[in-house]
Image: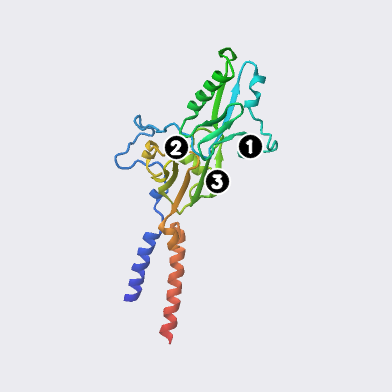
Amino acid sequence: MKRFKLLIIILSCVFASSCIPHKDTVYLQNKENSFNDSIPNNLTEVQKPYRIQINDILNIRVKAIDQETVSILNPSGEGDLNASGAERAYFDGFTVDLHGNIRVPTLGFINVLGYTTTQIEKMIEARLLEEQFKETANIFVTVKLAGLRYTASGEVGSPGTKTLFQERVNIFEAVANVGEITEVGNRKEVQIIRQYPQGQQIHTLDLTDKRVMQSPYYYIQPNDIIYVKPLKQKSWGTGKTAVESIRTIATVVSLFTTTLLLFTRL
């Protein structure tokens, strides 16, 4: 009888610790020192201007009154006319080399490492007006990143590399586009591995806390790697929900009871 009670106590402890708490699966909760408002007035999103890195691909377009005079500056994907999306951006864009340069027709090499797209627009426009055109040509330059490329791994629905064609992507949008975080994914410790000129750094986000929107890492950047750790419940293998845990415990109890009966009959 004592053994049976001990077994019940052990299994109860396993059951209590094996289920994933509801609070660990809910995003944007009001936690300590947080707010009850659905959208607090002082909960501001933080995003610094992105500065170009090595291996980024830039989409550069130049317009003028006489468009034929700038046609050479506007590539049309001669490398692969059948490519589309990310592939077309690769053939059509200007890739930043290991020295931080891009090679632009008629202008040659331009160093863009560490500059924002707005600064690069002004830089190219100034070079064109200085070397090739007059003010009356009304040169207009636009520079954009050719898609925001990032990689997601760990406990997400569809791990892999994704390219989104938009300027701003927050962590929730990035995760949603790779199939969401699985039931056994740790939403409290989502890691962002970010590229910097001096190397890589790891930043951690708690997606269950509303204050994550105030984080400087709330918006992802090109070449980010998002890693979602597994919860301890995955390695225990006792079940992600109460029903699964009950089934596991019932199996263990049945096995234990059968073994005990066999030994008592010997």
> Disc 1 residue type?
Phe
Residue 64, percent across and down?
61, 18
Q: Does 193 sit left or right of 66 as displayed?
A: left
Label disc, if present, on residue 91 of the rendered structure? 1
Q: Residues within 10 Å of mark 2 (few under 14, many from 20)?
A: some
At x 39%, y 53%, the residue is 21
Q: Earlier in the sequence, mark 2 or mark 3?
A: 3
Front of the two marks 2 and 1: 1
Q: In the image, what residue occupies the spot 33% across and 42% down? A: 31
Q: Position of residue 59 (x, y in %)?
A: 57, 31
Mark 1 surroundings: few (<14), some (14-19) or many (≥20) residues within 10 A: some
Question: Is 175 located above or below residue 251 in the figure?
Answer: above
Q: Which residue is mark 3?
A: 161
| Left or right of residue 161, residue 38 in this image | left
- Residue 40, image x and y in percent? 36, 32
* Crowd rating for badge 3 (residues with CA inside 10 Å; few <14, some 14–19, many 20+): some
Q: Quadrant of the N terminus?
A: bottom left
- Which residue is drawn at the image coordinates 44% and 61% (left, top)? 235
Q: Identify the mark nearer the N-term, 2 or 1.
A: 1
Where in the figure is residue 19, as x and y percent of width and height?
41, 57
Q: How far apart are the alpha carbons under marks 2 and 1? A: 27 Å
Q: Secondary structure at mark 2?
A: loop
Of residues 118 and 250, the one drawn nearer to the viewer in this rendering: 118
Query: Distance from label 1 to label 3 (Cα)?
Result: 18 Å
Disc 3 marks a residue whose amino acid type is Thr
